[in-house]
Image (tube, rainbow, N blue to C red):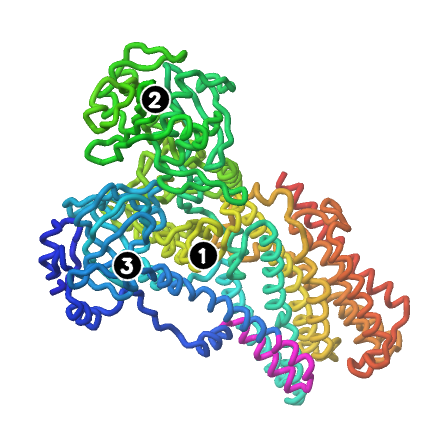
Amino acid sequence: MRIEAKQDWHHLAGDSAIALLESNLEKGLTTEEAHIRVAKYGPNALAAKKGKSALVRFLLQFHQPLIYILLVAVAVTGWLGEWVDSGVIFAVVFINAVVGFLQESRALKALEALARAMRAEARVIRGGKTREMPAGDLVPGDIVLLQSGEKVPADLLILRSHELRIDESTLTGESVPVHKKESVLAREIPLADRTNMAFASTLVTYGQCKGLVVETGEQTEIGHISKLVSEAADLETPLTRKIGHFSHILLYIILVLAALTFAVGIYQGNPASETFMAAVALAVAAIPEGLPAAFTIILAIGVSRMARKNAIIRKLPAVETLGSTTVICSDKTGTLTVNKMTVQEIVTGNRHYSITGTGYQPKGDILDADTQEKIEPGVALKECLLAGLLCNDSLLVEEEGEWTIEGDPTEGALLVAARKIGLTEEHYCEALPRISAIPFESEYQYMATMHNQGNDLPRRVYVKGAVETLLAKCKDRVTFEGDTAPLDHNQVFQEVAEMAKNGLRVLAFAKKELPAGTTEFGHKEVENGLTFLGIQGMIDPPRQEAIDAIAACHTAGIRVKMITGDHAVTASAIARQMNLDGSNSPQPPAVLTGREMASLSDDALARAVSEIPVFARVSPDQKLRLVCAQQAQGHVIAMTGDGVNDAPALKQADIGIAMGLGGTEVAKEAADMVLTDDNFATIKTAIEEGRCVFDNLTKFIVWTLPTNLGEALVVLSAIFAGLTLPVLPIHILWINMATALFLGLMLAFERKETDIMDRPPRDPAAPILTLTLGARIIVVSLLMTAATFTLFQWEQDQGNNIDAARTVAVNVIVFVEIFYLLNCRSLKRSVFSIGLFSNRWLIYGIVGMILLQLLFTYLPLANRIFHTTPISWDAWLRIIGAGIVVFSVVGLEKWIRQKVHR
């Protein structure tokens, strides 16, 4: 009978667990009992989470203040009979809703990807017979058989094993396969160190085992991750929060001004219908109809730019979020590192070598470790590398230019290192064919192979294994020239300690010769008399481009933190090589482990997170906790990762970034952005684009608000002064829609400014508009209002009719926007310093807008629709003069501010 309370299965002996689950080691469960348990506990699959219906999710896309304003605009313009304008505004709203709905639907695939990760076949003992069945039919108490190459179908307690190694990198972040065996472990031992357990969705790389199914479906570790993913909050991005806040303020301002306009008109004795139309005109003037469209299009252009630079954005607002990022939390394995074990240092013949090159591509040089000069390998180095080549059960394979390892990554690293000096398996397996082998067993901590050198020649034996084990069997060591000399054990241990300080995993190598014709080969033959060849130190190395990207992030004021399931020593060594904390210190940075983190309160963890750059041996829920702790401090978090274990944190982060090549489907579906080149450096490029997107959105807002505010002031001033309206509601709609399309959107094509990565990250709490920009908007609005009223009155004073005066007023507003647009290309610098013609799309937009205004003014059909009339050429000179005045005032204000801040 299954115990309902959560069990610490790793703390139980196999016999006890079998008894608890009422199973049998040799016979397993009966078919009847298995069917009963399936009915009781459900299939071995992740249950689909019930969410909002598609209709509800679509309707929620309209649940935004700015959308409310636009829906009001749709109703008002429709009530005015302007069906074309009403339809255009509604189309903008509808398209935005469809895009948001589709993006959200894609995000919901994360749990489906987790469920797919659980689907596999399993070999199970049922009723005393071994049979294959879908992994979904497994129940607690089943006895499962596993061998190399198979995926673990459920959480298992290992009962019997033979040299079992399991790749858990996608679940725990461990960079090398973990040796597993039957044992009883301490109750409090963390997930990554539970060597007597095999977890669902991990991969057997070597060996065999018989295991007891102890957890299935949602109760497995991957099921726990599924729950964390589903519970992680879908956070608003900094921009959507700010736009939402801005929209609320704008909504209140519009309602107050419209009500005030209506009240003043009634107080002055104006007819209620005319007063209501004036209030409607003011509301239409204040609504930035083009803002949602601009928001979407500017983000979409950013998405397109980033796609060309290997960053695929799955959710539009994520583009801008990158520009707001204050902290990047990065997984280590496969993200900061290449996820390919690589030999980096060798000590042999009393010489210390370093080896260049990373990954499985056999390219690199042998360097003197002290001088870093390229040298020719001596006899001792060749022998040490040859031992790693022949005492090896893995294969190095090239397919379509890509080098991969079939077998253990550690052995693969030895093959690659040997190839870098020209030693190949094909040649030496033929020259020195293997006769016999002693496979690696954890009890003995070494592997040995015996090779034939020729019929009358001695048998050659190569041994690799733990340093302590091999040293005890060695009588001497090889010299640089290939002779033998006394072996200094203390010196070897010092060299091993130095390598371990750098996070290297160290293997020792030795050789021996046995008499010609020897056929017996066992542990006795290698018990003593070995010649020590040297040690090889390997690690999953950092990407060079990631090191450069981290340095660029430091310059941009962005902190980078490593959060990994790997060992603390390895993580700290990688962090030091990458200068993760920006200190350039030769000492490794501070590390907080998952076990230490478990004892910290939320407040204590928040303090630790701000000071410590490396977090090692952490579980998936602890990664999630770390992200939340930093978000609680007001940081905007970008989280990178590639494994199943990263998915909850990816979803919780302000922007989740998954690896496209080496990442799991679970990680990709949970993320907001996917890197198609798995290159951490692409994040730095994406941050540049994100900052540029926010710059361009800010520029659009700074450009468009004076138009809406200026139009509102024109209407409001006319009502308060009891004057004729200089512009009609239909004029305002024309101005807002046409200028947003032909002028404002051209700011989306502005290039990023040269100092964009020299600025600190924006304060997430800061408003979109600073006091400086707010003051500029007010000044331009007042200048626009003054120019509109002045020239409107001038035309009437010259005896021109009301239509001519209004035509001039509309053109004044448009041309002030054109000249002001040039000033908005940079919020701080002069347009001449960035290049007047550097944005050709903006030039096209200005020319197109001018042509539209000429049609608006002189085309008879437009005259009838908009109540306009042709105007004189001297009126155009005054209109252009008004635009030049605004351009000059804003340019002067920028120049003064630059002088003051120097």
- Quick check: 578 above or below 218? above
Q: Relative to residue 475, is residue 761 drawn left or right? A: right
Secondary structure under tag 2 reads loop
For the residues marked 2 and 1, what is the alpha-carbon distance in whole angstroms?
57 Å
User: Could you tell me which residue is drawn at 33 percent across and 43 percent down?
Assistant: 174
Q: Secondary structure at mark 3?
A: strand
Choose the circle earlier in sequence order: 2 or 3: 3
Which of pointers 3 and 1 indicates the residue nearer the eye?
Answer: 3
Numbered tag placed on residue 22 in the rendering: none
Chain part drawn in magenta: 64-91
In the picture, residue 793 is in which quadrant?
bottom right
Q: Which residue corresponds to mark 3?
A: 122
**Residue 625 to residue 64: above or below:** above
Residue 807 place in picture, x, y as percent: 81, 74
Name the residue nearer the viewer: 901 or 247. 247
Q: Earlier in the sequence, mark 2 or mark 1?
A: 2
